Amino acid sequence: MMMLSNRPRYQTFVFHLLAASIALVFGLPALWVLAASLRQPGTPPPRTIEWFPDPIAWGNYAQVFELIPLGRYLFNSLLLAALAVPLTVLIASWAAFAMAQLPPRVRYTLLALAVALRMVPITALWLTRFLVLKELHLIDTFAALLAPAWMGSSPFFVLIFYWSFRRIPPALIDSARLDGLGPLAIWARIAMPLARSATVAVSVLTFVQYWSDFINPLLYLKSESRYTISVGLRILQQLDATNWPLLMAGVVIMMLPIVLLFVIVQRAFLVEGKIAGVYGN
Amino acid sequence: MRYAALLLVVMMTLLAACIPAPGAARPEPITFMIFGDTGEKAAYEALVAAFSERHPDILVTLLHIPGQSDYRKRLGVDFAAGTPADVVLLNYRRYAAFAAKGALEPLGPYLERSELISGDDFYPETLEPFIWEGQLMCIPQNLSSLVVYYNRDLFQAAGIAEPGDNWTWADFLAAAQALTRDTDGDGQIDQYGLGTEVSILRVAPFIWQNGGELVDNPTAPTRLALDEPAAREAIQWFVDLQVVHGVAPDAVAEAAEASESRFLNGRLGMFFNSRRGVPTYRTITSFDWDVAPLPQGKERAGILHADAYCMPSVSRQKDAIWTFIEFANAAEGQHIIAASGRTVPSLRTVAESPTFLDPGARPVRNQVFLDVIPYIRGVPVMETWVDIEQLTADELARAFYGQASVDEVIRTATERAQPFFP
Amino acid sequence: MSHTRYQVSLYLLLAPFLIGVLLLVIVPAALSFGLAFTSYDGLTPPDWLGFANFRHIFADPLFRTAVLNSLIFVIVTVPMRTVIALGLALLLYRPRRGVGLYRAAVYLPTVVPGVAYALIWLWLLNPLYGPLNLILGGLGLPTLAWLVDPRTALLAIALTTLFQVGEGFVVLLAGLQEIPNDYYEAAALDGAGRFAFVRHITLPLLAPWLLLVVIRDLIVSAQNTFTPALLMTGGGPYYATLFVPLLIYQTAFDRFRFGEGAAMTTLVFIGVGLLILLTHRLFGGWGYDDAV
């Protein structure tokens, strides 16, 4: 920390110049998308970059909702994510807590399992997962979309909790056990309160995962009334593949909740100190 | 043990949440799956509404899939899951894959017993392709053929006559050339004469008009016959429209803005499509449009586009389902769909009625669709046609966008298609 | 509470996860393996075919194209994505004024949903109207047809993935922050150059984290081609962006050849398994373990 204040001015300047231009490269497309979403549909797109379309067609956003039942899709996605987050946190943290407490040999086996699961190509499971879900009579239900939450949504989330729980001083848990507390009580009273940042991280990542999920609704849903926002955008694209203003309006609508959520919790992710709590010891 | 019990309760709840609750004891609704844009969807909504008025005891729910490829995927997945919709619309190019596996209930016997409709009411050209191993599998709703949709305002602006009923390939090319223009003088073409999907389906009528064939033997095909001189010449003519004459958007222009968008936005002179575009085109207010027959080659030929109502063999409530299919294809149902503009009705009486020929609704030259019927032909009906169609489309696109020669793509298409022939 | 009962209760906590894994991964994987030897089409009961599906796949030029495209994609993207994530992490790991904002900007594209991301890039790469070509044209540089040209389509999709490096970036940030401050102070005293410091001290200390990022990326990047390929190119032009996941999807869900799809799936499993074993051999570790 000492070094920072002594750093020459020009170095700070160069840093900001470099970092800002990188941020610009990463952020600029968002502005273009916004501008494209406000163009009058039907007119030939301009041959120069347009920052402020004239006239600004706010009506595009209303039109998207008229063209497809986007409100319904948004609600479905929100409901899905809202169900998936608590379920994921529960199952992933239970599994992680058990892993952290079990004897070393079992622990290493489970750890290897989690790592191996992380490596399984999901594309390879689409088809036969479909057959399993069919046997369970889950095709065309939200339960089919929620199914991954049964395994903590991603083995990575189990690992995040696991790393977090391993950092809890064993003495703390031992004394709780001497007090006669069982695993569920220790999990609830000691482990989870100490794993707040892991919980936030897993919650946010889970929300993003289910909000963005495209494959599962694409393959396992039938009824239009259950479609989610991802499928909605795909439908919009199929209705008219080159109606850019409407497509980009749909994109903005889909991205908005994610960006807002991310802005709210980004400190928990990216501000130093917390980060280590999320990713490893 | 308290937490263990709690755990059990939580798990049971989660499990319960996953099992669908048994429905109340009332008849399940019949599901009817369609694809198409919002205009087409509205037509089927009207049909379902009219049906529920006549048959309040039978509930029909519409499943709408916008894209054709998603529709196909859904069909496959639903059949595999054993839960297909009760009524599905299938094209004559695609139903064979299902019929061959016994997945469809033959509807011929139902039609024979029907008091509302009889096989004689239909144009035979549209029933015939749906006969699989001697049995009528599905009830066709329409027999559209490929036509030329054209922007009347652009023809007028270019100072050229609108296409006649007997125009030729040469007339067609001349019109397309006159319509292809750089309107703002920046060196880039902003208005094209012609827009078309590139597929065997679009090229086929021209091959037939030139005396060629798609396959060696249309009733028992064993290979693609695109390498015969007549077929090859027609393909070359079609490809040259883009490669030599530049009257259709090239690959870049097509990707930047699809031809159909260009047509809808008034920046494309002529667009090849079947009847299905009409409901959407009727919403066009910025210009006037009409339809013309395909330009003629050495002989007359048009290509059949037909979808039919099919009933999966696993469906329960077969009688109720037939009641719906029967209603949809009796005069009343066909009038409703025809009024939306979506179909060229398969029932002769409806096709020749004012509902279809309505002079107040575009296209004015509706008669074009009926005049071609005697000359209409279909692609071969076979289980693997979808595969053949897909790979030939991939090959033809290469030629149409100037990435390979016609001879080269015919050779690779023929070779690649071979495994899909018996 | 007795030790045994405590242990049993722990297993109860673990049970939902294990059941999920069983139903969603292990059973489907086993089924895949079984169906790979059958003619299953979803409509009629599966017939035993032996190795016919595999023979058919190996003879199919499209499968070869898809495998080759997937390999090229991995070879192109993984090193570039790793270097970008590392560079950004090195630039942004130290606390400074405004660094949070920069990190957020870098991470943001990663959380953009796949469908939205694909559509955005479809617009950015639009050959006539897209901002990218307009900028290139405006600067007097040659424009490209990107997704429309069979020669550039795969690289264009590879380009889009270079901005979604958030996960690797965050992992490497964590790794960099783990490096004890003593090193920096010692290096400052030595007057070691920045470059030399990175090369001789930072990178070796970061090695396990880098390994983690690379292994993860090797496996995921080939999978992640599905959504962009389906939405942006449909595998074209002329199979230039046909990747294995898209081919499996088309074979199984578009043509209903579930048996053949399962056979491809089995080959993917074997391929990924070999890849992982190879990495494990080369680096002597998983990347992830208790100590990381």
Image (cartoon, grey):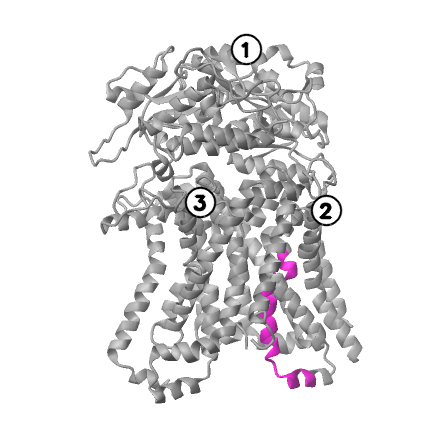
Classify B252 as above or below C282.
above
- State yes or no: residue A168 in magenta: yes
Q: Main secondary structure of the magenta part?
A: helix
For residue B1, what is the image quadrant?
A: bottom right
Image location (x, y in percent) of residue A38? 33, 46
CA distance for labels 2 and 1: 47 Å
- Is residue B274 visible in the rendered image? The answer is no
- Left or right, A130 with reference to B70: right
In front: label 2 or label 1: 2
Q: Which residues are magenta?
A: A148-175
For residue A108, what is the image quadrant?
A: bottom right
Image location (x, y in percent) of residue C108? 42, 61
- Is residue B16 visible in the rendered image? The answer is yes
Q: Residue at x 49, y 74 (%)?
A: C207
Closer-to-camera residue (C135/A242): C135
Q: Which mark is residue C232?
A: 3
CA distance for labels 3 and 2: 33 Å
- State yes or no: residue C79 in magenta: no
**Callout 2–callout 1 Cβ contact below 8 Å:** no
Q: Residue at x 41, y 54 (%)?
A: C160
Location of mark 2 (residue): A135
Q: Chain of mark 1?
A: B
CA distance for labels 1 and 3: 45 Å
Location of mark 1 (residue): B349
Closer-to-camera residue (B47/A272): A272
In front: label 3 or label 2: 3
Q: Residues within 10 Å of mark 1 (few under 14, many from 20)?
A: some
Q: Residue at x 56, y 54 (%)?
A: A79
Classify C40 as above or below B133.
below
